[in-house]
Amino acid sequence: MKNELVIVLDFGGQYNQLVARRVRECNVYCEIYSYRIDIEKIKAMNPKGIILTGGPNSCYEADSPTYTKELFELGIPVLGLCYGAQLMMHVLGGKVTKAEVREYGKTEVLIDKKDSKVFEGVEDATTCWMSHFDYIAQVAPGFEITAHTADCPVAAAENAEKKLYAIQFHPEVLHTVRGKEMLYNFVRGVCECSGDWKMDAFVENAVADIRNKVGDGKVLLALSGGVDSSVAAGLLSRAIGKQLTCVFVDHGLLRKNEGDEVEAVFGPEGNFDLNFIRVNAQERYYNKLAGVTEPEQKRKIIGEEFIRVFEEEAKKIGAVDFLAQGTIYPDVVESGLGGESAVIKSHHNVGGLPDFVDFKEIIEPLRDLFKDEVRKVGLELGIPEDLVFRQPFPGPGLGIRIIGEVTAEKVRIVQDADAIYREEIANAGLAREVNQYFAALTNMRSVGVMGDERTYDYAVALRAVKTIDFMTAEAADIPFEVLQKVMSRIINEVKGVNRVFYDLTSKPPGTIEFE
C-alpha cells in the first residue's frame, strides 16, 4: 500500500526532522529532501503537500538556496516556514529585506484573517516562536496578510486560491503553543490528507514487504537489547519466524539483570518465534580491558571485541542471505542521505560487520521511522513496555560510566548503584519525566566513616538530564528528598561506596555520558 506523502524541502534548517515528525503525528507520511532535488522527481512522487523549512541564509542574496518558481505553479499546496516563507515571497514577486529589529523567542502573534484554513481553531492572539533577521516587507501579488506581530508586519500570508501559505514563525517547535494545530490544519485541511499513516498498518505492510524480499532466505541480526534492534527483531520474527537468527552478545557491561531481561523476551521462553543465541562474553571483555584507562581506547576495545565475537558466531551459522540492522530514519538523514543538514555521523549500527559476515544484502525494516514511531511499533508487536521505553544506552555500555580501569568489581558497584537509583526514580513517578538518568562510578576514593570504622571507598555520581534532542541538555531538578533516599540506600546497600554526588552540569559544556 502506498501512503499519502508530504515532502519537506530542507533549506538547512535546524528543525527539519522536527517538521517531518509533526507531520507524521498527523498520521501522514512525510520524507525530507534537500532543496537541490530536481522538480521532476517531486512531480514523480506526486505529493499531497510540500513544506519549505527554515534556514540560516538571506533569500535575496545571489548564492542563497532557492527553488524554481514552477514549484508554486504545480497546484500542490505549499507551506513556507521562516526562510521558506521569505523564499516563497521573494520568488513570487514580494520583497524581503533585513529587519530593523530582530525577532527571537516567544512572541505574541495576532491573527488578522479569522477564517484562514491554517489558523482554524486558533485564538486571535497566540504565542509563537520567532527566529529571524530578515522580514517580509511586501507580500507577493495575490497574497494577503493573515497575521502580524508588534515588530513584524507579515507574520503570515496566504494565497488561498492557489493553496500557498507563508508563516514567518516556527509552528513545529513546542514553544509555538498552537503550532501542532496549524500544521494539522495545513496537512489534513488544505492538503486534504486522510491520515493513512498508522503503526498497525505499518506493521502489516512491513511484514508483507519482508516476506516478499526475504522469501525462504536466512536473516542474521545483532541484537543489543536497545529499542531499535529489539523492535527490528520483533518485526522480522513476525514476518519470517525461524528464518531469523538473533545474536545477543552480553559483554558484561549492561545494566543490572538486563541480559536476562533481553533473553526473557527473545529467548526460548519468550513469545517470539526466532533463533536466539546469547554469548556470555563478560570475562573475555574484562580481560581485554584490564589496565586500560583511556576512554577512547576502552571504546575501541569494546567495539572491536564485539565484532570478533559476532564474527565467530556468524561463522558457526554459515552463509546468510541478509544482515538485518535497526537503522531508523534520523540515522538515514544524519548520514547525509536525506535533507540538507550537515552529515553528523555515518551509521551502521553494527560497525564493520559487513566485512566479516558472509551475506548478500542488508535489510533495514525500520529505516522509515522516527524513534517515537519505533516505540509504537514495539507496543503493536507486543514487546514489553519496559524494553520499548528503555532509555538510550551507549554501545560501550557501563564501560564509559566507569572512570578509569574497568573491572568485574567496579561493574558490580555501578550496576547495583544504578539499579537503586532507577528504582527510586520510578517510585517517585519521575521515570517518564527525565529523559536520561543513571549512576556512574568515579575514580575518586576518599575517607569515610561507616559505623565505628574508617573507610576508604569510591564515590558514585548520579546523572539526570532533560533534553529534546540529546544535542543539548539541562540537569533535571530531582527533589532533594529523592536524592537523599538514593544516597542513603547506595551507601548502605552497595559495598565499596562511601560518597554520592549529583552532577548538575548541563550539555554543553559537559556531555550526557561521563566519557
Image (spheres, rainbow, N blue to C red):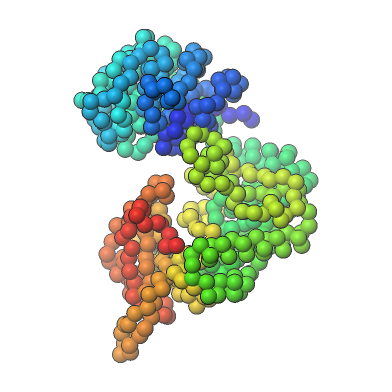
| Residue at the (37%, 17%) spot, across then down | 89
Q: Which residue ends up furthest to the bottom in the rendered image? A: 452
Q: Is residue 362 visible?
A: yes
| Residue at the (37%, 26%) spot, across then down | 58
Q: Nearer the viewer, residue 198 or 62?
A: 62
- The N terminus appears in which quarter of the rendering? top right
Q: Nearer the viewer, residue 60 or 28?
A: 60
- Residue 190 is drawn in which quadrant? top left
Q: Is residue 433 left or right of residue 67?
A: left
Q: Is residue 476 above or below residue 21?
A: below
Q: Is residue 405 above or below residue 361?
A: below
- Residue 287 is drawn in which quadrant? bottom right
Q: Is residue 150 above or below residue 435?
A: above
Q: Is residue 22 visible?
A: no
Q: Is residue 24 left or right of residue 251?
A: left
Q: Is residue 376 left or right of residue 467?
A: right
Q: Is residue 515 left or right of residue 287?
A: left
| Residue at the (50%, 58%) spot, across then down | 394
Q: Which residue ends up furthest to the left in the rendered image? A: 150
| Residue at the (59%, 23%) spot, across then down | 41
Q: Which residue ends up furthest to the front in the rendered image? A: 62
Residue 42 placed where, x, y %?
A: 56, 22
Residue 40 placed where, x, y %?
A: 59, 19
Q: Nearer the viewer, residue 109 or 419?
A: 109
